[in-house]
Amino acid sequence: MPVVLYICFYTVNDTVKPMESTTLIIGASGQIGIELTMALRKKRGNHMVIASDIRPTDDNDLLQGPYEILDVLDKAALESIIEKYNVDEVYLLAALLSATAEKNPEFAWKLNMEGLFNVLDLAKDKKISKVFWPSSIAVFGPSTPRNQTPQHTVMEPTTVYGISKLAGERWCSYYHERFGVDVRSIRYPGLIGFRSEPGGGTTDYAVDIFHKAIETGSYTCFLKENTELPMMMMEDAIRATISIMEAPASSIKERGGYNIAGCSFTPSEIASVIKRTLPTFSITYNPDFRQAIADSWPASIDDSKALTDWGWKSEYDTEKLCATMLTEIGKKKYTPLKPMHKLIV
Ligand code: NAD
Protein backbone atom coordinates (compact mmCIF):
# COMPACT_ATOMS: atom_id res chain seq x y z
CA MET A 1 0.00 0.00 0.00
CA PRO A 2 1.53 3.37 -0.96
CA VAL A 3 2.41 5.61 1.93
CA VAL A 4 2.03 9.36 1.44
CA LEU A 5 4.01 11.62 3.72
CA TYR A 6 2.83 15.17 4.06
CA ILE A 7 5.66 17.51 5.00
CA CYS A 8 4.11 20.27 7.05
CA PHE A 9 6.96 22.78 7.23
CA TYR A 10 8.47 25.01 4.57
CA THR A 11 11.26 27.55 4.70
CA VAL A 12 10.86 31.29 4.29
CA ASN A 13 13.82 33.64 4.80
CA ASP A 14 15.71 30.94 6.73
CA THR A 15 12.90 30.47 9.24
CA VAL A 16 10.92 27.29 9.56
CA LYS A 17 7.32 28.17 8.89
CA PRO A 18 4.56 25.71 9.69
CA MET A 19 2.05 25.22 6.84
CA GLU A 20 -0.69 24.66 9.35
CA SER A 21 -1.79 27.90 10.96
CA THR A 22 -0.65 28.60 14.51
CA THR A 23 -1.87 30.41 17.60
CA LEU A 24 -0.10 33.47 19.04
CA ILE A 25 -0.35 34.48 22.69
CA ILE A 26 0.67 38.07 23.45
CA GLY A 27 1.51 38.63 27.13
CA ALA A 28 2.32 34.92 27.61
CA SER A 29 4.55 35.46 30.66
CA GLY A 30 1.70 36.86 32.76
CA GLN A 31 -0.61 35.26 35.29
CA ILE A 32 -3.06 34.01 32.64
CA GLY A 33 -0.62 33.74 29.74
CA ILE A 34 1.55 30.98 31.23
CA GLU A 35 -1.42 28.77 31.99
CA LEU A 36 -3.18 29.48 28.71
CA THR A 37 0.01 28.71 26.76
CA MET A 38 0.38 25.39 28.59
CA ALA A 39 -3.28 24.46 28.05
CA LEU A 40 -3.29 25.34 24.35
CA ARG A 41 0.02 23.56 23.74
CA LYS A 42 -1.41 20.45 25.38
CA LYS A 43 -4.28 20.56 22.88
CA ARG A 44 -2.44 21.71 19.73
CA GLY A 45 1.19 20.67 20.30
CA ASN A 46 4.12 22.76 21.57
CA HIS A 47 5.15 24.18 18.23
CA MET A 48 1.67 25.21 17.16
CA VAL A 49 1.36 27.78 19.96
CA ILE A 50 3.69 30.77 19.86
CA ALA A 51 4.25 32.41 23.24
CA SER A 52 5.31 36.07 23.20
CA ASP A 53 5.87 38.81 25.74
CA ILE A 54 7.74 42.08 26.08
CA ARG A 55 10.04 40.47 28.63
CA PRO A 56 12.29 37.41 28.33
CA THR A 57 11.50 34.27 30.29
CA ASP A 58 13.34 31.43 31.99
CA ASP A 59 10.12 29.53 32.58
CA ASN A 60 10.68 25.95 31.42
CA ASP A 61 7.08 25.40 30.43
CA LEU A 62 6.98 28.49 28.22
CA LEU A 63 10.27 27.42 26.61
CA GLN A 64 8.86 24.03 25.53
CA GLY A 65 7.73 25.75 22.31
CA PRO A 66 8.52 28.97 20.41
CA TYR A 67 8.97 32.06 22.61
CA GLU A 68 9.32 35.49 21.01
CA ILE A 69 10.09 38.88 22.53
CA LEU A 70 7.32 41.14 21.23
CA ASP A 71 6.04 44.58 22.16
CA VAL A 72 2.40 44.63 21.07
CA LEU A 73 2.73 48.38 20.46
CA ASP A 74 5.23 47.63 17.69
CA LYS A 75 2.80 46.79 14.87
CA ALA A 76 5.52 45.94 12.33
CA ALA A 77 7.13 43.43 14.72
CA LEU A 78 3.72 41.93 15.47
CA GLU A 79 3.00 41.56 11.77
CA SER A 80 6.35 39.93 11.12
CA ILE A 81 5.74 37.30 13.83
CA ILE A 82 2.31 36.62 12.37
CA GLU A 83 3.92 36.11 8.97
CA LYS A 84 6.87 34.09 10.31
CA TYR A 85 4.69 31.53 12.10
CA ASN A 86 1.62 31.60 9.85
CA VAL A 87 -0.48 32.77 12.81
CA ASP A 88 -4.22 32.53 12.39
CA GLU A 89 -5.59 33.25 15.86
CA VAL A 90 -4.34 35.67 18.50
CA TYR A 91 -4.95 35.79 22.25
CA LEU A 92 -4.13 39.35 23.34
CA LEU A 93 -3.36 39.37 27.08
CA ALA A 94 -0.89 42.26 27.33
CA ALA A 95 -2.39 45.08 29.41
CA LEU A 96 -1.82 47.19 32.49
CA LEU A 97 -4.11 45.87 35.24
CA SER A 98 -6.37 47.89 37.55
CA ALA A 99 -4.01 48.83 40.39
CA THR A 100 -0.94 49.41 38.17
CA ALA A 101 -3.02 51.39 35.68
CA GLU A 102 -4.14 53.88 38.36
CA LYS A 103 -0.45 54.69 38.95
CA ASN A 104 0.17 55.40 35.26
CA PRO A 105 -3.16 56.27 33.58
CA GLU A 106 -1.70 57.68 30.37
CA PHE A 107 0.44 54.66 29.61
CA ALA A 108 -2.37 52.29 30.67
CA TRP A 109 -4.67 53.88 28.11
CA LYS A 110 -1.96 53.69 25.43
CA LEU A 111 -1.08 50.04 26.03
CA ASN A 112 -4.63 48.79 26.59
CA MET A 113 -6.08 50.59 23.54
CA GLU A 114 -3.26 50.70 20.97
CA GLY A 115 -2.37 47.07 21.58
CA LEU A 116 -5.99 46.13 20.85
CA PHE A 117 -6.16 48.28 17.70
CA ASN A 118 -2.97 46.70 16.37
CA VAL A 119 -4.50 43.24 16.66
CA LEU A 120 -8.02 44.18 15.50
CA ASP A 121 -6.58 45.95 12.43
CA LEU A 122 -4.65 42.81 11.44
CA ALA A 123 -7.92 40.87 11.69
CA LYS A 124 -9.73 43.55 9.67
CA ASP A 125 -7.01 43.20 6.98
CA LYS A 126 -7.57 39.39 7.02
CA LYS A 127 -4.00 38.66 8.23
CA ILE A 128 -5.51 36.69 11.12
CA SER A 129 -8.97 35.20 11.39
CA LYS A 130 -9.83 35.04 15.10
CA VAL A 131 -9.03 37.17 18.16
CA PHE A 132 -9.48 36.65 21.90
CA TRP A 133 -9.33 39.80 24.00
CA PRO A 134 -10.13 39.71 27.73
CA SER A 135 -12.42 42.25 29.29
CA SER A 136 -13.05 42.49 33.02
CA ILE A 137 -15.66 43.09 35.72
CA ALA A 138 -13.91 46.51 35.90
CA VAL A 139 -16.21 47.64 33.05
CA PHE A 140 -18.86 48.10 35.73
CA GLY A 141 -18.97 51.01 38.16
CA PRO A 142 -20.62 52.28 41.34
CA SER A 143 -23.95 52.90 39.58
CA THR A 144 -24.14 49.27 38.37
CA PRO A 145 -26.36 46.87 40.39
CA ARG A 146 -23.83 45.14 42.69
CA ASN A 147 -25.49 41.76 43.14
CA GLN A 148 -25.97 39.33 40.28
CA THR A 149 -24.84 42.08 37.89
CA PRO A 150 -26.60 41.39 34.57
CA GLN A 151 -24.96 41.08 31.15
CA HIS A 152 -26.58 44.35 30.01
CA THR A 153 -26.76 47.08 32.63
CA VAL A 154 -25.49 50.52 33.61
CA MET A 155 -21.73 50.73 32.92
CA GLU A 156 -19.99 53.79 34.32
CA PRO A 157 -16.48 52.64 35.33
CA THR A 158 -14.44 55.03 37.46
CA THR A 159 -10.94 53.56 36.92
CA VAL A 160 -8.71 54.09 33.90
CA TYR A 161 -8.50 50.30 33.60
CA GLY A 162 -12.30 49.97 33.57
CA ILE A 163 -12.67 52.81 31.07
CA SER A 164 -10.11 51.14 28.77
CA LYS A 165 -11.89 47.77 29.06
CA LEU A 166 -15.32 49.27 28.34
CA ALA A 167 -13.93 51.20 25.36
CA GLY A 168 -12.19 47.99 24.22
CA GLU A 169 -15.48 46.07 24.37
CA ARG A 170 -17.20 48.69 22.25
CA TRP A 171 -14.36 48.63 19.70
CA CYS A 172 -14.46 44.81 19.52
CA SER A 173 -18.18 44.98 18.87
CA TYR A 174 -17.68 47.74 16.28
CA TYR A 175 -14.98 45.78 14.40
CA HIS A 176 -17.28 42.77 14.35
CA GLU A 177 -20.34 44.68 13.10
CA ARG A 178 -18.48 46.91 10.65
CA PHE A 179 -15.69 44.67 9.34
CA GLY A 180 -16.84 41.15 10.23
CA VAL A 181 -13.89 40.59 12.62
CA ASP A 182 -14.34 37.37 14.63
CA VAL A 183 -13.37 38.69 18.05
CA ARG A 184 -14.47 37.01 21.27
CA SER A 185 -14.27 38.32 24.80
CA ILE A 186 -14.97 37.45 28.42
CA ARG A 187 -15.32 39.75 31.42
CA TYR A 188 -12.97 37.90 33.76
CA PRO A 189 -13.58 38.26 37.50
CA GLY A 190 -10.54 38.20 39.85
CA LEU A 191 -8.48 35.18 38.80
CA ILE A 192 -6.86 32.87 41.31
CA GLY A 193 -4.13 30.44 40.34
CA PHE A 194 -1.20 28.69 42.01
CA ARG A 195 1.02 28.45 38.94
CA SER A 196 1.95 32.12 38.42
CA GLU A 197 2.10 35.46 40.24
CA PRO A 198 -0.73 37.99 39.87
CA GLY A 199 0.07 41.06 37.75
CA GLY A 200 -1.10 44.14 39.71
CA GLY A 201 -4.88 43.81 40.03
CA THR A 202 -7.27 44.70 42.86
CA THR A 203 -8.12 41.05 43.49
CA ASP A 204 -4.44 40.02 43.90
CA TYR A 205 -5.00 39.63 47.67
CA ALA A 206 -6.96 36.44 46.97
CA VAL A 207 -3.79 34.84 45.54
CA ASP A 208 -1.27 36.35 48.01
CA ILE A 209 -3.31 35.24 51.03
CA PHE A 210 -2.68 31.55 50.24
CA HIS A 211 1.07 32.05 49.80
CA LYS A 212 1.37 34.01 53.06
CA ALA A 213 -0.89 31.58 54.94
CA ILE A 214 1.50 28.75 54.06
CA GLU A 215 4.77 30.71 54.32
CA THR A 216 4.19 32.77 57.46
CA GLY A 217 0.79 31.84 58.89
CA SER A 218 -0.52 35.43 58.73
CA TYR A 219 -1.63 37.98 56.14
CA THR A 220 -2.29 41.72 56.05
CA CYS A 221 -5.06 42.38 53.55
CA PHE A 222 -5.23 45.60 51.51
CA LEU A 223 -9.04 45.38 51.33
CA LYS A 224 -11.59 45.63 54.16
CA GLU A 225 -12.81 42.37 55.67
CA ASN A 226 -16.35 42.60 54.19
CA THR A 227 -15.42 43.52 50.59
CA GLU A 228 -17.20 40.93 48.48
CA LEU A 229 -15.87 40.46 44.93
CA PRO A 230 -16.42 37.95 42.12
CA MET A 231 -13.51 35.51 41.77
CA MET A 232 -12.64 32.51 39.64
CA MET A 233 -10.18 29.60 39.78
CA MET A 234 -7.66 29.83 36.93
CA GLU A 235 -8.63 26.36 35.60
CA ASP A 236 -12.19 27.65 35.11
CA ALA A 237 -10.94 30.82 33.40
CA ILE A 238 -8.73 28.86 30.98
CA ARG A 239 -11.58 26.45 30.20
CA ALA A 240 -13.91 29.42 29.54
CA THR A 241 -11.32 31.09 27.29
CA ILE A 242 -10.71 28.00 25.18
CA SER A 243 -14.37 27.09 25.00
CA ILE A 244 -15.54 30.53 23.81
CA MET A 245 -12.81 30.39 21.13
CA GLU A 246 -13.89 26.89 20.05
CA ALA A 247 -17.62 27.71 19.97
CA PRO A 248 -19.22 28.09 16.52
CA ALA A 249 -19.22 31.76 15.46
CA SER A 250 -23.02 31.68 15.17
CA SER A 251 -23.38 31.00 18.92
CA ILE A 252 -21.39 34.09 19.94
CA LYS A 253 -24.09 36.73 20.27
CA GLU A 254 -22.14 39.21 22.42
CA ARG A 255 -19.10 40.66 20.69
CA GLY A 256 -18.25 43.08 23.51
CA GLY A 257 -17.66 40.78 26.47
CA TYR A 258 -19.53 37.96 28.22
CA ASN A 259 -20.20 37.97 31.96
CA ILE A 260 -18.80 34.79 33.51
CA ALA A 261 -18.99 33.88 37.20
CA GLY A 262 -17.07 31.54 39.48
CA CYS A 263 -17.63 32.25 43.16
CA SER A 264 -17.87 35.41 45.30
CA PHE A 265 -16.31 35.91 48.73
CA THR A 266 -14.96 38.52 51.16
CA PRO A 267 -11.44 38.51 52.70
CA SER A 268 -12.89 37.42 56.04
CA GLU A 269 -14.81 34.52 54.45
CA ILE A 270 -11.71 33.26 52.65
CA ALA A 271 -9.70 33.61 55.87
CA SER A 272 -12.27 31.45 57.72
CA VAL A 273 -12.04 28.73 55.10
CA ILE A 274 -8.20 28.83 55.28
CA LYS A 275 -8.39 28.58 59.09
CA ARG A 276 -10.22 25.29 58.87
CA THR A 277 -7.07 23.87 57.26
CA LEU A 278 -4.47 26.05 59.01
CA PRO A 279 -6.05 26.75 62.44
CA THR A 280 -3.31 29.19 63.54
CA PHE A 281 -3.69 31.42 60.47
CA SER A 282 -4.44 35.06 61.30
CA ILE A 283 -5.49 38.02 59.14
CA THR A 284 -5.35 41.79 59.71
CA TYR A 285 -6.74 44.55 57.50
CA ASN A 286 -4.95 47.65 56.24
CA PRO A 287 -7.01 48.98 53.29
CA ASP A 288 -5.17 51.12 50.71
CA PHE A 289 -6.12 52.85 47.41
CA ARG A 290 -7.36 49.53 46.02
CA GLN A 291 -10.34 49.65 48.40
CA ALA A 292 -11.98 52.42 46.34
CA ILE A 293 -11.50 50.35 43.16
CA ALA A 294 -13.03 47.26 44.79
CA ASP A 295 -15.97 49.32 46.13
CA SER A 296 -16.84 50.36 42.58
CA TRP A 297 -17.08 46.75 41.32
CA PRO A 298 -19.86 44.14 41.49
CA ALA A 299 -20.10 41.63 44.34
CA SER A 300 -21.51 38.84 42.17
CA ILE A 301 -22.19 38.26 38.47
CA ASP A 302 -25.11 36.84 36.48
CA ASP A 303 -23.54 34.71 33.74
CA SER A 304 -26.69 33.09 32.37
CA LYS A 305 -26.11 34.57 28.88
CA ALA A 306 -22.76 32.72 28.56
CA LEU A 307 -24.50 29.50 29.61
CA THR A 308 -27.27 29.98 27.04
CA ASP A 309 -25.02 31.02 24.16
CA TRP A 310 -21.95 28.76 24.46
CA GLY A 311 -22.58 26.48 27.44
CA TRP A 312 -20.37 28.10 30.09
CA LYS A 313 -20.53 26.66 33.63
CA SER A 314 -18.04 27.10 36.47
CA GLU A 315 -16.67 24.03 38.27
CA TYR A 316 -15.03 25.68 41.31
CA ASP A 317 -16.93 26.99 44.34
CA THR A 318 -15.12 28.76 47.20
CA GLU A 319 -14.41 25.52 49.12
CA LYS A 320 -12.93 23.71 46.12
CA LEU A 321 -10.92 26.79 45.14
CA CYS A 322 -9.40 27.09 48.65
CA ALA A 323 -8.63 23.39 48.93
CA THR A 324 -6.90 23.43 45.52
CA MET A 325 -4.85 26.54 46.29
CA LEU A 326 -3.65 25.29 49.69
CA THR A 327 -2.77 21.85 48.38
CA GLU A 328 -0.96 23.03 45.25
CA ILE A 329 0.96 25.91 46.88
CA GLY A 330 1.82 23.59 49.74
CA LYS A 331 3.23 21.04 47.28
CA LYS A 332 5.22 23.68 45.40
CA LYS A 333 6.73 25.41 48.40
CA TYR A 334 7.20 22.57 50.85
CA THR A 335 8.11 19.10 49.71
CA PRO A 336 7.88 17.49 52.20
CA LEU A 337 5.51 19.92 53.92
CA LYS A 338 6.88 21.74 56.96
CA PRO A 339 5.30 19.99 59.97
CA MET A 340 4.12 23.34 61.41
CA HIS A 341 2.07 24.06 58.35
CA LYS A 342 1.06 20.57 57.40
CA LEU A 343 -2.18 20.84 55.45
CA ILE A 344 -5.27 18.95 56.42
CA VAL A 345 -7.16 19.32 53.13
P1 NAD B 1 -0.30 40.11 33.81
O1 NAD B 1 0.06 41.50 34.16
O2 NAD B 1 0.03 39.02 34.76
O3 NAD B 1 0.32 39.74 32.39
C1 NAD B 1 0.39 40.64 31.32
C2 NAD B 1 1.61 40.28 30.51
O4 NAD B 1 1.69 41.21 29.42
C3 NAD B 1 2.92 40.42 31.30
O5 NAD B 1 3.66 39.23 31.22
C4 NAD B 1 3.64 41.58 30.63
O6 NAD B 1 5.06 41.44 30.61
C5 NAD B 1 3.06 41.55 29.23
N1 NAD B 1 3.15 42.84 28.56
C6 NAD B 1 3.07 44.07 29.12
N2 NAD B 1 3.25 45.02 28.17
C7 NAD B 1 3.43 44.37 27.00
C8 NAD B 1 3.65 44.80 25.67
N3 NAD B 1 3.74 46.10 25.36
N4 NAD B 1 3.77 43.86 24.72
C9 NAD B 1 3.72 42.54 25.01
N5 NAD B 1 3.52 42.07 26.27
C10 NAD B 1 3.37 42.98 27.24
O7 NAD B 1 -1.89 40.11 33.47
P2 NAD B 1 -2.89 38.88 33.52
O8 NAD B 1 -3.44 38.81 34.89
O9 NAD B 1 -2.28 37.68 32.90
O10 NAD B 1 -4.05 39.47 32.60
C11 NAD B 1 -4.10 39.23 31.21
C12 NAD B 1 -5.33 39.93 30.64
O11 NAD B 1 -6.50 39.51 31.36
C13 NAD B 1 -5.29 41.46 30.77
O12 NAD B 1 -5.91 42.03 29.64
C14 NAD B 1 -6.13 41.73 31.98
O13 NAD B 1 -6.73 43.00 31.91
C15 NAD B 1 -7.19 40.64 31.87
N6 NAD B 1 -7.80 40.34 33.16
C16 NAD B 1 -7.08 39.74 34.17
C17 NAD B 1 -7.69 39.49 35.39
C18 NAD B 1 -6.93 38.82 36.52
O14 NAD B 1 -7.50 38.64 37.61
N7 NAD B 1 -5.70 38.41 36.33
C19 NAD B 1 -9.03 39.84 35.59
C20 NAD B 1 -9.71 40.49 34.58
C21 NAD B 1 -9.11 40.69 33.34
Image (cartoon, rainbow, N blue to C red):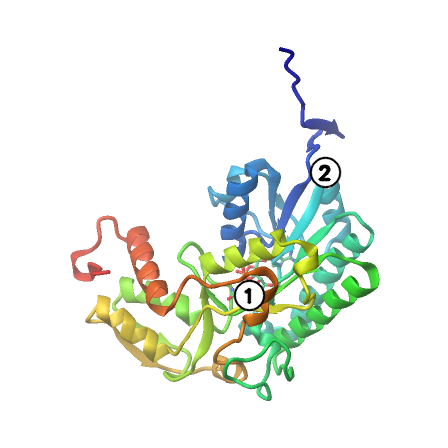
Task: Identify the amino acid type marked 2.
Answer: Lys
Q: Nearer the viewer, residue 145 or 196?
A: 145
Q: Residue 159's quadrant in the figure?
A: bottom right
Q: Quadrant of the N terminus?
A: top right
Residue at image position (68%, 28%) is: 9
For residue 307, the mark is 1
Horizontally, residue 145 falls left or right of residue 16, namely left
Closer to us: 143 or 341: 143
Q: Residue at x 59, y 85 (%)?
A: 144
Q: Is mark 2 within 8 Å of ligand 1?
A: no
Compared with 157, 311 (above or below) is above
Label 1 or label 2, whichever lies nearer to me, is 1
Residue 112 is at least partly visible in this image: yes
User: Horizontal and vertical percent for residue 309?
Assistant: 61, 64
> Does the rendering let one see residue 100?
no
Location of residue 330 in the rendering, given as x and y in whole percent from the top left corner: 29, 56
Amino acid, disc 1 = Leu
In the depicted structure, whether residue 34 falls above or below residue 11: below
Residue 332: image location, x then y, percent: 32, 51
Q: Earlier in the sequence, mark 1 or mark 2?
A: 2
Secondary structure at numbered mark 1: helix
Q: Give the Cα separation between the discs numbered 1 and 2.
A: 37 Å
Q: Secondary structure at mark 2?
A: helix
- For label 2, the crowd category at 10 Å Cα-Cα, with few meaning under 14, some 14 to 19 and many 20 or more, is some
Q: Which residue is mark 2?
A: 84
